[in-house]
Amino acid sequence: GIHTEMLTDACVDLYEEGRITGAKKEIDTHKMTYTFAMGTQKLYDFLDNNTMCASYPVSWTNDPRWIASNSRVVAINNALEIDLFSQVASESVGTRQISGTGGQVDFIYGAFNSHGGKGLICLSSTYEAADGTIQSRIRPMLSPGTIVTLPRTVVSYVITEYGTAQMKGKSTWQRAEALINIAHPSFRDELIRSAGEMNIWRRSNRM
């Protein structure tokens, strides 16, 4: 089922492959619920007079209470940085504004309170800085001045190309260790040293 702020071409692809029916949704059953659509002509042709598609105000689609009304909600969001305490920054790096909050907070809270729900923060482990150097998106602490989009208390899953780290119910040092395990290998030793200096590292899983 689909309950989203933005409907995209990928949703059409999933529908055409038979993977989206909406049959198991507990609210807006058999409906693809969204606020706005952005994509190619294929998406707009799909929407035209399609009674399966239901566009609602953002006050409905992004209300965490309504999001959580469906069971097993999977909320997928991106991020710019995450620190070893599992605070997520999705809006700025330092004081440089890059994006807005969007529906990230709404959907992560909704998934957190959904029965069997999962909130996923998905990010590449590194990025190329303006000076051409490769930097880790998993950092000991967020860059000074960075806006915290998600507090650590609602972060459940963090995913990079190196795996998945589950945060819920973990202590501070367990979160740090899990995040280091999915950081780019080139930065893991540096992150361990920093975590040690911050007194949040225990060598329990490292080979």
Image (cartoon, rainbow, N blue to C red):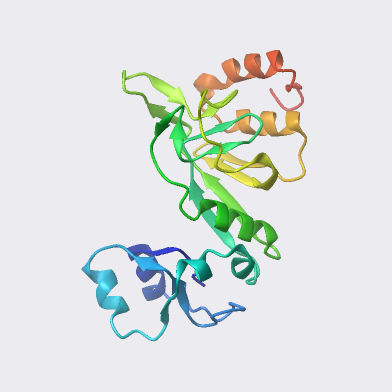
- Vertical placement of 48 versus 88: above or below? below
Residue at the spot 74% in from the left edge and 31% down from the top edge: 172
Residue 79 lies, in percent from the top left, at 48, 41
Q: Is residue 197 left or right of residue 63?
A: right
Q: Position of residue 154 (x, y in %)?
A: 67, 47
Q: Is residue 192 left or right of residue 51?
A: right
Asked if residue 3 can be seen in this view, the reply is no
Q: Position of residue 84 (x, y in %)?
A: 63, 29
Nearest the viewer among 31 and 162 is 31
> What residue appears at the point 75 percent right and 18 percent down from the top-left corner?
199
Q: Is residue 205 left or right of residue 83?
A: right
Q: From where the camera sits, is residue 99 visible?
A: yes
Question: Which quadrant, please, contains the C terminus?
Answer: top right
- Count of marks overlaid on the render: 0
- x and y percent of residue 62 in the render? 52, 63
The residue depicted at 37 percent of the width and 63 percent of the height is: 10
Q: Residue at x 45, y 52 (%)?
A: 102
Would you place residue 80 above or below residue 61 in this image?
Answer: above
**Furthest residue in direction left, as rendered:** 41
Determine which quarter of the picture holds residue 15.
Answer: bottom left
In the rendered image, the vertical position of residue 165 relative to residue 26, given as above or below: above
Q: Is 21 located above or below residue 104 in the figure? A: below
